[in-house]
Each structure stands twice: as C-alpha cells, then as structure tokens.
Image (cartoon, rainbow, N blue to C red):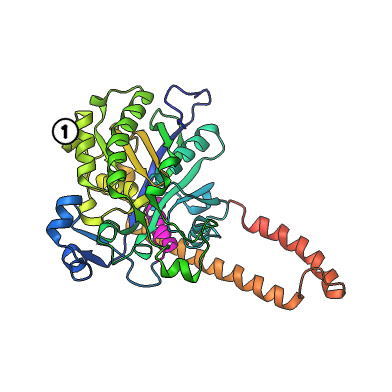
Amino acid sequence: MNGQGVNGSHSNGRYAQITGWGSYVPEKILTNEALAHVVDTTDEWITSRTGIKQRHVAGNERETTAVLAARAGREALLVAGLPPSRLDLIMGATATPEYMFPSTASLVQDALGARAAGAFDLSAGCSGFLYGLNMGMAAVRSGMADHILVIGAETLSRIVDWSDRNTCVLFGDGAGAVVVSVCTDRCGVLATELGSDGSGGQLLILPAGGSHQPASLESVSSGGHFVKMNGREVFRFATTVLPKATEAVVRKAGWQLADVALVIPHQANTRIIESAAKRLNLPMDKFFINLERYGNTSAASIPIALTEAVAEGKVRPGDKLVLVGFGAGLTWAAAAVEWGVPPARTTRTFLDRLLAQLGFFFAGIRSWILRSERHAYNWAMGPVGKDDWRGHLRQRLDVWRSKVRRRFTRRD
C-alpha cells in the first residue's frame, strides 16, 4: 500500500503538520551489565551486535502500556498548546496493548479527558507509529479531522523470555506521541510509504494468545506468550527494506536524498542503520540514533527519537525529515516530513504546565464520576428489560441519560 504523496489532491489547501511531540519511559533502567547476571551474555556481546547499552523497563504493575501512552500524550498536547477537548481522534500503535479489548487508545482518551475524540488501536509491529501517522495525515488532509493524537507505546518487557539472550537483550519499554493538526502552509507530513509481506509473518511473532492458539496451560508452559524471532532473517529483511522505503518516500515527496536533513529510523540495531546509510550513500551524521539508551521500543522508538532530536536542536523549521521503520508483519513504513513548527511553540511556561496538569487531574475525577454513576444506576434500576415499574422507568431514563451524556461529552 502506498500513501499519498505531495502531488496528491490539495484543492482544499489542508496539510497535516506535527505541532506537538512528547515521550515517556519508565524510571527503571536495565543495563547490559545487570542483564549479564540474568542470562548468559556480556556487555561486549550485546553492544557489538546491537549497539544497545541499556533499556528502560516497567518497574511495577502500575506502569502499563496505557499509563506510558497517556503520559507521552500529555507531553505532546502541552507542546502543541492544545486542550484534549479539541482532539478528534486518538490512535494507539502497540504490540503490547493493555487488553485485547477495550483498546488502549480508549483508555488514554479517558485519562486525557478527550471528550470528543474517537479512539482505536492499530497493530503493525514496530512500523505501527508510522502507519498511524499515515492515517492521521489522510484524515486531516481529507477534512475528516483537525487534530489527531498518534501514540506508539509498548511494555515489551512483559512479553520477552528473560532466559533467551537472543531476544531479551533487544527490547525496552516506553511511549512517544505526536499531535497532527491541520495547517494551510505546505509543511508537515507530505508523503508516506507503507508495505507488508505477510509471508514473513512467522519470522517475528507472538505465537499464543490469539484465535490461532488461545491461552491455555500448554501455551503458557511452552513459552508461546513470549516473542519469537528469527534474527538472521529479520536482519536481512530490514537492511533491504529500510533504504528502499526511504528512497520511495523521498521520491513521492518530490525531494532528492541530498535534501534530507535528518533520517529518524526505527531504533532496532545500529548495524541495520549503518547498512541503510551505506546503501543510500548518506553520512551517518544524517541518522539520529538513541537506541544505546532505550533498546528497541517497537512502535514507540520513532516518536521517542523524534522528541529527543527536537530537544537536542537537531530539527529546525524548514528541515526535511524522513521517518522510516520496519517490523512484524512483516511490515515497513516511511514518512517524509517538512518541519514547520516555529521555535516559540516548543516552550511552555510554568503556568501552562500547571493549567494542563489541573486539566488532567479533573479528567481523572470526571472518569471516576462516570464510572461511579454507571455502577450506582445499574444497582438502583436493576437489569435491562425487566417487565415491572423499574424496568419501564429505566427505559425512559436510559433515553434521557443518553441525551445528557452526549451533551456532556460534546466538544466545547
């Protein structure tokens, strides 16, 4: 599947600009040296093969995918100066959702107090964030939405086999998010490239837990709920598709490779990035790399890297960026982004942060009130459809409550 390029229809003058960005990672850091006490490995073995020195991992049961995602989303909204009530849609890209359902994005919508936003998750492995960015671009350009929050969030430490040194050394936890907003200037996400090769699905897979192999005593005891990866084949796939996707999206945007100021690749392996740079004939200083501190955070890796690149002053207004990744599926994706945010938008005052935090605090209170009201109402009125005075009263009250709820959740 190919995303829209810069030469696509823009008769309505709408472009999709990244106006906010943010990330969050757990406080707990697991170094290579610490891992060497858990599994048969060494710092030298991990670093030489991957470039990873440490990773952040969820340190307690309260650090879940939804919690990490909500915190990254808050930061992105703060940078954008956008109240959650103005969001039209929240998309969560994750391979480690809070639940099979409801979606993690719906939980984030509630936590942020985004009363008027729709929400859903998407699954495209490590490419998931860029798939979400493509969908956000399309929705904004078409006029379906004005403001969208795209989040990549993972708690991969919960699905790795800590006795398998070939996988457990690779992954970390974290979340990154961007706000995609409508603008009339020619900037933002100008082109995307998406692809998939499902014949390679078995090369990177979580075998159990779905309809193919439902959870059972056997699936748990056999390790079916841990990530399984054919590292050699995934490496071969990645070194081929990363430069191809980069070239394709640059061509769609109407650029030359020499025009690109910075490439922000999926942070999986330094050797993969070095191979892509060589094939593209680009210097390594045009590639942003931070995986030595975070490891592979899957769908979260590119938005975390983008947030750090901006913070370090490596992204400036007018810069042409390529975000590119690959992942389970097998999938790949790339986005050509012309950075259009003026520097003044990247800083917020203490008062801005205080007001935003108060807003999130009241969002939590609102969520508690809604849950409590629903519980009390169901207890008082009894089951739906009961043929007595309470049942008839409930039918009328349900209609009234739906009207009130629609008004309560309407955007200001």
Q: Is residue 65 covered in magenta?
A: yes
Question: Quarter of the image holding residue 334?
Answer: top left
* Main secondary structure of the magenta stretch: helix
Q: Is residue 208 left or right of residue 102?
A: left
The amino acid beneath tag 1 is Pro
Residue under label 1, please give it.
Answer: 283
Q: Position of residue 5 (x, y in %)?
A: 43, 26
Residue 245, placed above or below residue 307? above
Q: Nearer the viewer, residue 138 or 80?
A: 138
Q: Residue at x 31, y 23 (%)?
A: 255
Q: Is residue 376 left or right of residue 192?
A: right
Q: Is residue 399 left or right of residue 236?
A: right
Whether residue 157 is visible, yes or no, is yes
Q: Nearer the viewer, residue 10 or 221?
A: 221
Q: Residue furthest right?
A: 388
Which span of residues is magenta-colored?
64-77
Q: Residue furthest bottom?
A: 380
Q: Position of residue 38 (x, y in %)?
A: 22, 70
Whether residue 87 is visible, yes or no, is no
Q: Is residue 175 covered in magenta?
A: no
Task: Give neighbour class at mark 1: few <14, some 14-19, many 20+ (Cα, 10 Å).
Answer: few
